[in-house]
Image (cartoon, rainbow, N blue to C red):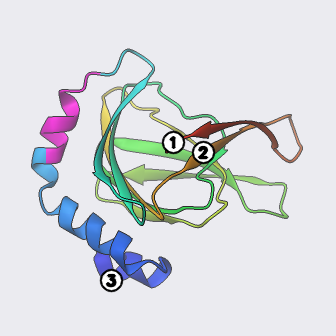
Amino acid sequence: MAGLVADRCDDARAAAVLSELVRDARRLVARGLTLGPPPGERAWLRLVDELDVDAWLIVWSPGAATGMHDHGDSQGIVRVLRGSLLERYSVRGRTRERVRQLRAGTTTFLARGHRHDVVNAGRAETVSLHVYAPGLTRMNFYSVPPASEPSLRETYPVRP
């Protein structure tokens, strides 16, 4: 799994952190389920907090969604540990939107500038692990008018 992700991620430390954390996936799922997000929302816990890499455990209640966003100057690796997520995204320069399902055991790479909306469309809580390099400093959220390019709505600082 780590080799596959490392092939697309130009940050070997991020891939190594993900591999190390996934070794204890059962414990992470159990820990995540104690976070108990409200209906339609998410709850998260930062597991690694360093400037060059950080890692987040996120629990998604049914219906929870992020809204269209990117991860600033960071690239990411996401591993679904339990349940599944739907990711809606578009490739720059193309108008057609794409949707992919990220099931338990799926690992996906998010390049810098990758804009997406993620939702738990299932009936049960989903638990996912997110590793970013460098560590997140901001997330940019976008308005998405129908049939047009998303426009920046707000920037949310993650690290002061």
The residue located at (85%, 64%) in the rendering is: 93
Report the amino acid beneath label 3: Gly
What residue is disc 1 on?
A: 158
Question: Position of 138 compared to 53: left or right?
Answer: right
Question: Position of 140 compared to 59: left or right?
Answer: right
Q: Residue furthest top?
A: 39
Report the amino acid beneath label 1: Val
Question: For numbered disc 3, what is the local secondary structure?
Answer: helix
Question: Tag on residue 3?
Answer: 3
Q: Nearer the viewer, mark 2 or mark 1?
A: 1
Question: Tag on residue 139?
Answer: 2
Range shown magenta: 28-36
Q: Earlier in the sequence, mark 3 or mark 2?
A: 3
Question: Position of 143 compared to 132: left or right?
Answer: right
Query: Is residue 8 depicted above or below 60 in this figure?
Result: below
- In the foreground, 118 or 132: 132
Q: Gap between marks 3 and 2, in whole Å?
A: 27 Å
Tell whether label 1 touches label 2 (CB within 8 Å).
yes
Q: Residue furthest right?
A: 148
